[in-house]
Image: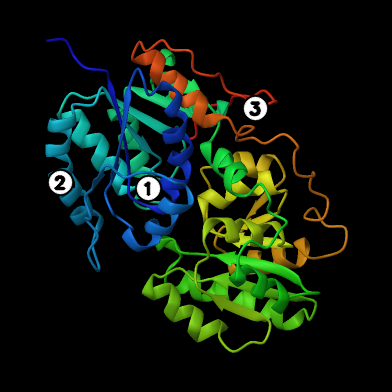
């Protein structure tokens, strides 16, 4: 008997993966008569992920629930490899999609490779140039590039990076980044307070310029995190016209230092993480964002917001080149200087282009582009709609690879 319709398996386990893969999963719906889409949630970040499954209306076909307290990347990888293998044997996917650079993405790619299943890598080609920073993400993404058969890049720069590493040009498709799709889908009415928690925050900070902080990366822990928080506390203490809002990551190290350094100041608000729609609403009302998050560097251009990046380097230089971000290089003195600069009258942060200008990560049609590319790879020919964004994908000129 011949094969049944091909199976596309999408694997995720963390909040950023789901945000970026949800538009891809939904974009397969028009192809449903010709192929079957299957989702696997590894549960790498179980508690953080569950509310987002509801927000993005993503059905989970297989839940691995690998999360344990204090788990190491090696333990996560081993548990995923063990749990996903029987699912691969039973579902026999024609292609397996992973996103980005998490341990879930690496483990999924390894498991599929061992089974001879082609791997498609969403958000391929990002490089910081330092294999140990961010850790372990930089090495994860490099390894996935060696395992993947198909590479879906957000920008032409990412494509150029892969070409410089010897990746075959016919295996690369420039699609834009689906985080822009997700932002448009969930944050379309970003100027309306959608939740009681957001409304309460906005009421409590009315009349003040809002600096929104997010920080959670391993390389920021310890002395770097402490120094950054002290700089922010001192800056807010000097500026009576500003406040700091910090949705505190559940990591115990982050919570400990946030409480020790920031708690008790009347214009510092330490809050629990918000759902995605409320968080986008908060970012839309920010004067300035300070973050070590890669996703926020991608969201800022869509929201027209300035970002100070709490990292030594970034795999997303497009945000800096487009004028939306500046790099603190994890130097407290540089962070203090950048805060003063960004919050001064007539600064670069005040003069950013309005929302709707060209976005280096695409106009918000990456999900349909990726789904269409996968359908073509599998030889599925149906009358699915083409990408519908009203602007062509625009990116900076290609440059040499950074890795």
Q: Are marks 2 and 1 in contact (CB under 8 Å)?
A: no
Q: Earlier in the sequence, mark 1 or mark 3?
A: 1
Side of 259 where 326 appears, left or right: right
**Is residue 383 or residue 85 the one in the foreground?**
383
Mark 1 sits on what residue? 137
Q: From this viewpoint, is residue 128 visible?
A: no
Q: Within 10 angstroms of label 3, few (less than 14), some, or many (20 or more) residues? A: some
Picture layout, residue 250 above or below residue 352: below
- The numbered disc on residue 149 is none
Tell me the quarter of the picture where residue 285 sits: bottom right
Residues under labels 1 and 3: Cα distance?
Answer: 31 Å
Q: In what quadrant of the picture does the C terminus appear?
A: top left
Q: In what quadrant of the picture does the N terminus appear?
A: top left
Which tag is nearer the camera, tag 2 or tag 1?
Answer: 2
Report the residue at 70% width, 77% height from top.
235
Picture layout, residue 252 above or below residue 132: below
Mark 3 sits on what residue? 389
Side of 167 where 158 appears, left or right: right
Q: Position of residue 264 (x, y in %)?
A: 59, 89
Q: From this viewpoint, is residue 23 visible?
A: yes
Q: Position of residue 201 (x, y in %)?
A: 65, 74
Residues under labels 2 and 3: Cα distance?
Answer: 38 Å
Picture layout, residue 86 above or below residue 334: above
Q: Position of residue 167 (x, y in %)?
A: 38, 20
* SS at circle 1: helix
Q: Within 10 angstroms of label 2, few (less than 14), some, or many (20 or more) residues? A: some
Q: Position of residue 110 (x, y in %)?
A: 22, 36
Report the residue at 45% width, 24% height from top.
30
Mark 2 sits on what residue? 83
Q: Earlier in the sequence, mark 2 or mark 1?
A: 2
């Amino acid at each position: 008997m011949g094969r049944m319709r091909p199976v596309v398996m999408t694997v995720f386990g963390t909040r950023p993966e789901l945000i970026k893969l949800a538009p891809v999963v939904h974009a397969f719906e028009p192809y449903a008569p010709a192929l079957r889409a299957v989702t696997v949630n590894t549960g790498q970040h179980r508690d953080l992920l569950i509310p987002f499954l509801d927000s993005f209306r993503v059905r989970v076909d297989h839940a691995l629930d690998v999360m344990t307290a204090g788990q190491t990347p090696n333990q996560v990888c081993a548990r995923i490899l063990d749990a996903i293998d029987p699912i691969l044997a039973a579902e026999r996917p024609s292609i397996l999609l992973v996103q980005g650079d998490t341990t879930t993405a690496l483990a999924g790619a390894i498991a599929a490779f061992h089974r001879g299943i082609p791997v498609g890598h969403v958000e391929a080609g990002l490089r910081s140039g330092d294999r140990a920073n961010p850790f372990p993400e930089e090495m994860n993404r490099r390894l996935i590039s060696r395992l993947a058969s198909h590479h879906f890049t957000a920008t032409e720069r990412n494509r150029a990076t892969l070409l410089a590493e010897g990746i075959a040009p016919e295996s690369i498709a420039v699609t834009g980044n689906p985080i822009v799709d997700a932002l448009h889908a969930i944050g379309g009415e970003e100027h309306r307070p959608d939740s009681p928690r957001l409304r309460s925050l906005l009421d409590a900070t009315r009349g003040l310029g809002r600096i929104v902080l997010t920080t959670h990366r391993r390389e920021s822990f310890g002395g770097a995190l402490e120094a950054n928080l002290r700089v922010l506390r001192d800056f807010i203490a000097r500026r009576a016209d500003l406040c700091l809002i910090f949705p505190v990551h559940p990591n115990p190290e982050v919570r400990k230092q946030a409480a020790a350094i920031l708690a008790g100041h009347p214009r510092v608000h330490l809050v629990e993480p918000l759902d995605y729609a409320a968080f986008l609403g908060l970012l839309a009302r920010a004067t300035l964002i300070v973050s070590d998050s890669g996703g926020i560097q991608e969201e800022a251009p869509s929201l027209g917001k300035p970002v100070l990046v709490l990292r030594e380097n970034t795999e997303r230089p497009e945000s800096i080149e487009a004028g939306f971000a500046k790099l603190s290089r994890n130097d407290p003195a540089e962070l203090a200087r950048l805060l003063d600069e960004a919050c001064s009258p007539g600064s670069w942060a005040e003069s950013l282009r309005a929302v709707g200008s060209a976005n280096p990560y695409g106009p918000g049609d990456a999900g349909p582009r990726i789904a269409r590319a996968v359908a073509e790879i599998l030889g599925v020919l149906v009358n699915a709609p083409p990408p519908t964004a009203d602007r062509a994908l625009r990116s900076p000129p290609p440059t040499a690879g950074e890795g």
